[in-house]
Amino acid sequence: MKPARLFRIKFLACSLITVASLLLTLGCGRGRGRAIDVVYISAPQVFLRDRVAPVYNKVGVLKNAERVEVLDRDRRFLKVRSASGAEGWIEQRYTIGQQTYDRLQKLANDNKDTPVQATGTTRNDTNIHLEPERDSDHLYQLAEGAKVSILKRSSSERETSAPAPPANAGKKEPPKTVMEDWWLIRDAHNRTGWVLARMVDIDVPLEIAQYAEGQRIQAFFPLDDVQDGDKKIPEYLVLLSESKDGMPFDYNQVRVFTWNVHRHRYETAYRERGLEGFFPVTVTRENFDKEGSLPVFVLKVHDTAGNLIDRKYKLNTPIVRRVLASGETPERKPTARKTKRSG
């Protein structure tokens, strides 16, 4: 074979090998950059690392609820890419998956028309959970002082560590359980989920809160306005319960506060105890012939047989009366009474 021809064959072979290697390299590069999953950041913020190692460089910052693509996994770390194209490694414990995110979206959609029972303010930075349990998944975090709408209440058990027994003690006691109340809330961004009730202060006006008498205010509703000079003063329905978590009802006491225009102060126009009441409470107005249009509120309570029924009441300041449905007779148990002074 002539040297020139042999040279052309060798050159062609080398070229083919080079092209094949380049295509393989490009193919592998595309594979490494392809997303294998999607997750959302559940911490307030997370730094992107350039490597999985004790010593690393910060190459970016991810914010709460940010959607990122997963490119690779290494033990408890994920390599992710943000919407801006930044790539790096983060700890997996700071994320939730698409399924959990979808469940949170469904929770919000299912409760978009749930009536608000009270408004509140967060005491501290607070996580919004998928379920009313401490170890349930969470995504969003509310900042201290955030305003929320309260929709529902629930309770769950929380295990507490029992103190270590003495060395000569016998059988070890099982962990004790305590009950915790949770609120289903909706924030200003329509994000919905469960938060610990003790992390939220109900925004009941101080003029009313001072008459709680050691009870816990669970909800409150403006019923009507009264003109006192150049001011309009709201009158309130307030629902209360013992100051204890885990009660089998949402409230067991009702009070209506009306405004005395002569003494310029709130007074208790109506009080009812011994209820087993549940959310939601509805407040509307109805026309009552000669009395005109009056505020009306409806409570969901257990009757003496344990059935959940609606009880309707009307306020014709300063008098509150039951509104009986057609054929309904008042219960014999005298649980309601009227008072003229607050407290």
Image (cartoon, rainbow, N blue to C red):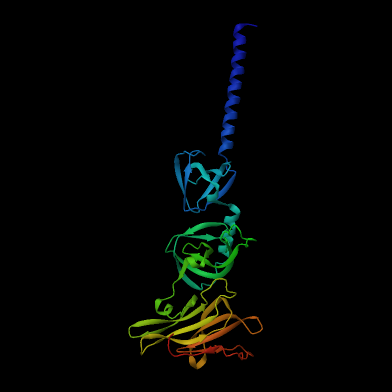
Visible residue check, residue 13:
yes
Picture quadrant of residue 129:
bottom right
x, y percent for residue 163: 56, 61
Please report the residue visible at 58 percent of the width from the left and 20 percent of the height from the top: 15
Q: Quadrant of the C terminus?
A: bottom left
Q: Quadrant of the N terminus?
A: top right
Is 212 left or right of 12, judged from the image as shown?
Answer: left
Which residue occupies the extreme top position in the image? 2
x, y percent for residue 342: 43, 86
Please report the residue visible at 52 percent of the width from the left and 64 percent of the height from the top: 195
Which residue is at the front of the view, 252 or 320? 252
Which residue occupies the extreme left position in the image? 230
Placement of 191 over or under 202, stated as above or below: above
Is 11 left or right of 55, judged from the image as shown?
Answer: right
Visible residue check, residue 293:
no
Which residue is at the front of the view, 75 or 112? 75
Which residue is at the front of the view, 232 or 2? 232
Picture quadrant of residue 306:
bottom right
Which residue occupies the extreme front position in the image? 168
Placement of 138 over or under 119, stated as above or below: above
Which residue occupies the extreme bottom position in the image? 290
x, y percent for residue 71: 56, 41
